[in-house]
Amino acid sequence: MITGEHTMADGAAMRRALELATRGPASGVNPRVGCVILSPHGDVLAEGWHRGAGTAHAEVDALSKLAPGAAQGATAVVTLEPCNHTGRTGPCAVALIDAGIARVVYAVADPGDHSAGGADRLRSAGIEVTAGVLADEAEAFLDDWLFAARHRRPRVTMKWAASLDGRAAASDGSSRWITGQQARADAHRRRAAADAIAVGTGTVLADDPSLTARTSAGELLDAQPVPVVFGRRPIPADAAVTRHPHAPITLRGADLTGDLRELQRRGIRSLFVEGGPTLASAFLAAGLVDELLVYVAPMLLGGPRVAVGDLGVASIAEARHFDFAAFERLGDDLLVVARPIAIRPPARSTTDTDDAASSSTSVKEGN
């Protein structure tokens, strides 16, 4: 919804601002933001973008390219509502006011507890503010960051591989490989797209996964998720995860909601949860899963090695419902993508996530 009048020049400048925003880092605590400053006649005076935490915000970067007084009466077009807080840098709203900007046009409101309110501050200073220009495009562009900022946690994608009867391994624990090469390659590609990948300490102790994203030939992909290990037991000094390109983050797992907030504070916007069943069950029971990726192999295994354990569901009426978002044939296997229809109030947010007996051998699918 657009509030306030906007011009064709505003729309063109916003599209350019979105292009500029792509030059910033795609991960981290801060969003990618672009800014274009227009003269009162609609001519471009300056451009700027945010280059990462601790650097000048897009509005300040653009203003820095103008001579003193050159922004008087100008319009600032920015992809995100100018911030209203002092962190490593000062409030962008104040910088715009001090520069003499007459109008501010932005696409998406800032959802931060401390950074929001820039638009109100600008209006209080007599500056005309228009919101919502190219909002859909900006929302899509800032999707992961906006989700993390609005929910105070990363978006959680949970993955497992299983047989037709829902087993992650045979009765003797063997599981290499349940799914075929195409399914494993797809999982690694999705790992690489996530900011972080998580398992429990039981999985680390039982399976010794590297938690890297690799090609089918075993080479590391350019993008690597940060490994996160939930649980109380220490990681062995010679564990494969200690040789990951990124240092592992260890969290006790006693308060998943708090742990996810800590990851969000560290700039983790998307989390790929792989195993094992105890950790998976804890996330599901707490209502903290936003997407399921289930790779189904055309085999039957039977036995006790299930992909997911107890969810606290005692009857059909208490079932956790998901919507089938997509299906994809990957060689002989099937990928099912499902998303929760409604997040129930958390049944619990504490768990012993480091139970080695429940370690998911589905991690061996990608190791």
Image: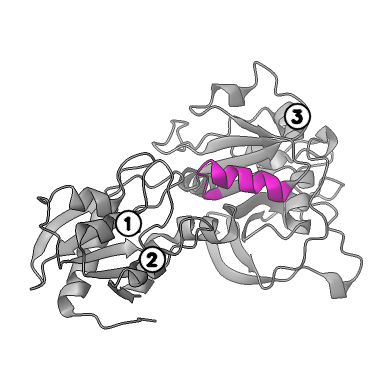
Q: Of label 1 and label 3, which has the lower sequence position?
A: 1
Q: Is residue 68 left or right of residue 49?
A: left
Drawn side of residue 55 relative to residue 113, left or right? left
Name the residue: 87% across, 59% down. 312
Say which element carries label 1. helix
Q: Position of residue 325 (x, y in %)?
A: 57, 70
Q: Is residue 327 left or right of residue 93?
A: right
* Residue stretch in magenta: 256-270
* Res 311 → quadrant: bottom right
Which residue appears farthest toward the top when viewing the image?
A: 238
Between the C-alphas of marks 2 and 1, the distance is 8 Å
Q: Is residue 104 above or below residue 367?
A: below
Q: Nearer the viewer, residue 232 or 199?
A: 232
Mark 3 secondary-structure assignment? helix
Mark 2–mark 3 Cα distance, whole angstroms, equals 55 Å
Tell me if residue 76 can be seen. yes
Q: Is residue 137 visible?
A: no
Q: Residue 302: give x, y in percent of width and height.
A: 84, 50
Q: Which residue is mark 3?
A: 206
Locate residue 30, reporting x and y percent.
42, 48
Mark 3 nearby-residue class (10 Å; few <14, some 14–19, many ≥20): some
Q: Which residue is mark 1?
A: 94
Residue at the disc numbered 2:
121
Question: Residue 355 appears at what percent x and percent y?
Answer: 83, 36
Q: Mark 3 and mark 1 in contact (Cβ < 8 Å)? A: no
